Amino acid sequence: MLPPSTNAAYAGHPAAAWFVMLTGVLSIIPGCIHFFLPDGGAGVIAGIDLSTRATTIIAVFAWLGALQIPHGILQFVIGWHYRPLVPLVLALVIVERGLMAFDGWFGKASLTGHHPPEHYASVAAVALAALFLFLSQPRRVAG
């Protein structure tokens, strides 16, 4: 199912690949929470009021979890076995988490005035992914 590893072609810092694997795990875990918890984590973790439209909110959380689980698996596999794709994954993490942070603090989600843990984590993820994107670039040797 998987082609041979391309890790030999990767010239960036190994820590960037490990960070991509970590982002994969940190996507799989909330994906499982969203998909398998009875309320998807909407009430017990995010603190969302489920007194109205609970079934819709829980269904959307489960749908998100169904996306997060395979996305996280792919990130982990890339960090482990296909490291030349690490910079691309990190750039996509920056876009994904940047959009989430913007929405949480300034967009539609900010209108509720409520900030679940993900709003804070997305800001931190953008900064960390930018650092590791820098580290993932091929090292240049002087001379």
Image (tube, helix red, strand yellow):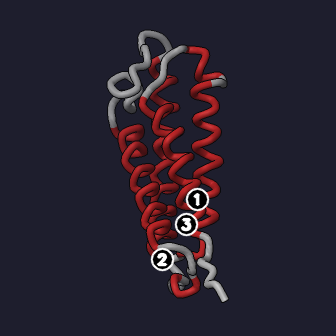
Q: Residue at x 55, y 75 (%)?
A: 12
Against 65, residue 133 (above or below) is: below
Against 104, residue 64 (above or below) is: below
Q: Residue at x 51, y 51 (%)?
A: 128
**Badge nearest the viewer, 1 or 3:** 3
- Picture coordinates of residue 3, whole percent (x, y): 54, 83
Mark 2 residue element: helix
Against 131, residue 55 (above or below) is: above
Mark 3 residue element: helix
The one of 17 and 46 positioned closer to us in this rendering? 17
| Label 1 environment density (alpha carbons within 10 Å; few <14, some 14–19, many ≥20) | many
| Label 2 environment density (alpha carbons within 10 Å; few <14, some 14–19, many ≥20) | some
Could one spot residue 93 in this view of the protein?
Answer: yes
Residue placed furthest toward the top: 51
The one of 1 and 123 positioned closer to us in this rendering? 123
Mark 1 residue element: helix
Q: Which residue is mark 3?
A: 135
- Picture coordinates of residue 92, whole percent (x, y): 63, 54
Q: Which residue is mark 1?
A: 90
Could one spot residue 67 in this view of the protein?
Answer: no
Q: Residue at x 45, y 18 (%)?
A: 54
| Residue 81, disc | 2
**Separation (CA) of disc 1 from disc 3:** 10 Å
**Badge nearest the viewer, 1 or 2:** 1
Q: Earlier in the sequence, mark 1 or mark 3?
A: 1
Q: Amino acid at mark 3?
A: Leu
Against 124, residue 130 (above or below) is: below
